Amino acid sequence: MYCSALVLQLTLVMHSSVLAFWSPIAEYNYHFRRTAQVCRFDMDCTGHQPAAWVPAVQKYIAVCHATFCRLVSGDGEQHELDNWNMPADAADKKFQGLVEPSKASGQAKCKCKDGNTKACKKLKGKAKGKFIFGTSTCQNCKWRTGSCIAECQCEIGQRSACKDIDADWSDGTATCMKPCVWDFSACTRCTCTEGKKRSCSKVDKFFNIGMATCGPDCTWNVQKCSVCQVQKGSVEVCKNKCTSLLKDPQNCGKCGKKCPGDEICNKGKCRCTGGRKRCTTGSGRICMNLKNSFAHCGACGNACRADQKCVLGQCEGKPAFTIEVQYDGPVPEGGQEFVEKAIRRWQNMITGDLPDITFEGKEIDDLLVIISFLEIDGVGKTLGQASPATVRNLPDGSPLGAPLRGFAYIDKDDFGVVSDTVLMAVLVHELGHVLGLGALWPTHGLIGTGEEPGDLPVCDEENDDEPSEVWYFGGNATAQYNLIFGVEGFVPVEAKGPAGTCGVHWDEAVFGHEMMSTAIAADATTRQPISKVTLGALMDLGYQVDLDAAELYEPPVN
């Protein structure tokens, strides 16, 4: 009765398609119920103990009955699991005599042993004759055909460049081998994507300088790579370049330490050259020649009066270039002092005297500026306007010399409202226009929209979206621009805005806070420096200037 009940229950279970076969995975916890059921790893047999670990399980079927889990072979013989923690090898020996269940019992036959391999073309069953090449691996009792090849890839003996067959290969030639598949054994596998760049040190540890580029053969081209003989404290790799920390002004003493202004790096320290001394100004640290510097005559910060010049470190007489001021209308309190300071900044840089000229009964040496403080357009808009009014004749009689006199208008509504920094910048800037900067560029043939001077920009309120490019062609300013910015080309001029803005200032987007760029913020606190580019433009107009007297200027980071 015991045996028949077990066999009957097993038959019912199989007919109901609940039968689950053992997996060849190492170990599962099998559970059982009080009624006979096939033991499965996913059955919920709460309250019962797990069955034993049984290897080679594809030969047996386990069922639950009463309080035991029994193995039944193809002949229906029952084997009680009397040791729940039986080791794998002991269980294998215990049941090694059991036969494999027959197909008649409803159990599927395991086709192979996991991990075994076989040539794809030797597979049987549905796969027989389907594949011509490759190796199949047994997994979960089945032969897997993912790596098998079913069709010919080529004609036997055919040869072709590896990269033409498969983009993963570069150099070499592939040969078609039996049974009609490509042999890539003589090919070189790609190491990169064409055009991609990478630091040489990451391509080959031998290099530590430069960038390698992936070539059309999808291998790294290291022709521009090199080796830097690093010496701590003197030679280091800074931003992928072999750098002398003893001489490089961009990396003086250590990587990233930049010498200010035009200081040089000497033995790892920033120093001034030519006997100049380092002075701290509103623009930062700068090297000055104390023998002829108007603002630092004999000592840093020792400025000469507007009617003096610096000779061998002593303030004497009047300066070489004189700017005389005539006020038209009332002057706000403190206005005259600001004007004198603004004049002094230009006189410190212009070193050549011009002939005295009598104009309308008044002798002028060298420039007369008529300044008016009046209403222009209210607070925070246009701060000032200026222009030359009378220009000196050249020796041949043509009116292309330096200005003789000019006008400057300062918005009185902004005076006393904006900061001293902004007010000083406005006065110096407008005096620059009176000197001819911007105002005389077209008449002197110094700007244009093409590759040569002549074509002048169209300046109006509507040209802000897509303005023409405007360039300054004067040789002296261009040379200084290329030196400071590290480029090769003409000086970019502001191309946006109406007349009075467009074509008469340096390009604001390029020059930033330089004195002769377009605008200054009403709340600015940083001094607007007069750069060597601006002094070069004065030289292009015929002035004699001291380039070393230029104020510290560094281009914007962008």
Image: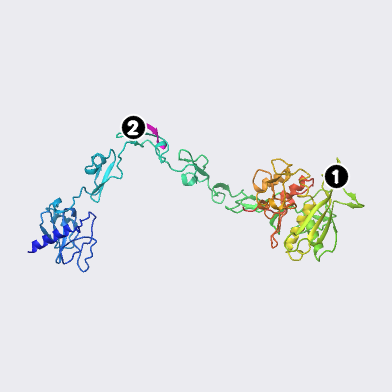
Q: Which residue is mark 2?
A: 155
> Pointer 2: residues within 10 angstroms few (<14), some, or many (20+)?
some
Q: Residue at x 86, y 51 (%)?
A: 365
Q: Residues within 10 Å of mark 1 (few under 14, many from 20)?
A: some
**Which residue position is annotated with label 1?**
393
Query: What kind of element bears circle 1?
Result: loop
Which image quadrant is residue 67 in?
bottom left
Q: Position of residue 192 (x, y in %)?
A: 45, 43
- Residue 298 visible in image: no
The image quadrant where one finds the N terminus is bottom left
The residue positioned 80% from the left and 52% from the top of the image is 387
Task: Please report whichever mark, 2 or 1, sits nearer to the chain's N-terminal start.
Answer: 2
- 403 lies left or right of 163: right
Q: Residue furthest bottom?
A: 47
Q: Amino acid at mark 1?
A: Asn
Front residue of 179/405: it is: 179
SS category of the residue bearing label 2:
loop
Q: CA distance from mark 2 to mark 1?
A: 90 Å
Stretch in magenta: 154-163
Give, as a three-letter code, the residue at label 2.
Answer: Glu
Viewer-side residue, 358 vs 15: 15
Locate residue 252, reporting x and y percent: 61, 52
Using the rendered image of the protein, determine whether residue 155 is visible from the camera's viewpoint: yes
Return the x and y of residue 133 as percentages of the image width and height.
29, 38
Residue 162 magenta: yes
The answer to whether residue 455 is above or below residue 174 is: below
Callout in the foreground (2, 1) = 2
Residue 428: image location, x then y, percent: 76, 56
The part of the image, by quadrant, that contains residue 455 is: top right
Callout 2–callout 1 Cβ contact below 8 Å: no
How is the rendered protein coloured? rainbow
Q: How many marks?
A: 2
